[in-house]
Image (cartoon, rainbow, N blue to C red):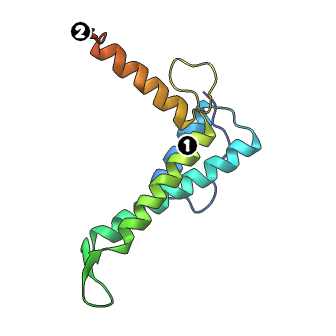
Amino acid sequence: MSIGPRPPAGLQIRGKALWRDVVSTYVLDPAELALLVELCCTVDEIDRLTCALSAQEMVVTGSTGQPKANPLLAELREHRKVSERLAAALALPIPGESAGRRRSRQAKSAAQTRWNRAKSGPKLVDNR
């Protein structure tokens, strides 16, 4: 296990931890390092949004006095989506794989369908 490049300046606790975990395990090319920087920054932003949201109400008053979801909820949701996309684009190998691969949503969905069918057993057809 190697040390790898130092984390970029400005990363917080979870971002630095993610950086160190990845670069100590994998050798990344420059494009992958750029994705990792973005992923680490996004993870830190998620933490800051979560902290800010915990100090506020989940439901706030809208411009016309109506109750509405705190806008930070939408930002948090979007940051989580970005985090998921960045992690998928980084395509790190999962345990048991020799190399990472990008998994499309369609491929994941097909695999999940096959898995669910296998778990539920064969379907019986009534030919009356």
Residue furthest to the right in view is: 30
What's the amino acid at mark 2? Arg
- Camera-side residue: 75 or 5? 75
Rendered location of residue 92, percent (x, y): 59, 33
Residue 128 badge: 2
x%, y% of residue 117? 35, 18
C-alpha gap between disc 2 and disc 1: 50 Å
Q: Nearer the viewer, residue 111 or 13?
A: 111
Mark 2 or mark 1, earlier in chain:
1
- Percent coordinates x, y for residue 50 in the rendering: 36, 63
State the SS at label 1: helix
Quarter the N terminus occupies: top right
Q: Residue furthest front?
A: 128
* Res 51 seen here: yes
Viewport quadrant of the C terminus: top left
Q: Nearer the viewer, mark 2 or mark 1?
A: 2
Residue placed furthest toward the bottom? 64
Q: Label 1 amino acid?
A: Ala
Q: Is residue 48 visible?
A: no
Above/below status of 75 relative to 98:
below
- Which residue is painted at 44% across and 66% down in the image? 75
Whether 69 is drawn above or below 95: the answer is: below
Decide: few, some or many residues near mark 1? Use Cα within 10 Å; few <14, some 14-19, many ≥20.
Answer: some
Judging depth in this view, the residue of 89 and 121 nearest the camera is 121
Badge 2 vs badge 1, beta-carbon distance below 8 Å: no
Residue at screen point 65% across, 48% down: 35
Q: Is residue 47 left or right of residue 124?
A: right
The residue labelled by disc 1 is 87
Q: Residues within 10 Å of mark 2 (few under 14, many from 20)?
A: few
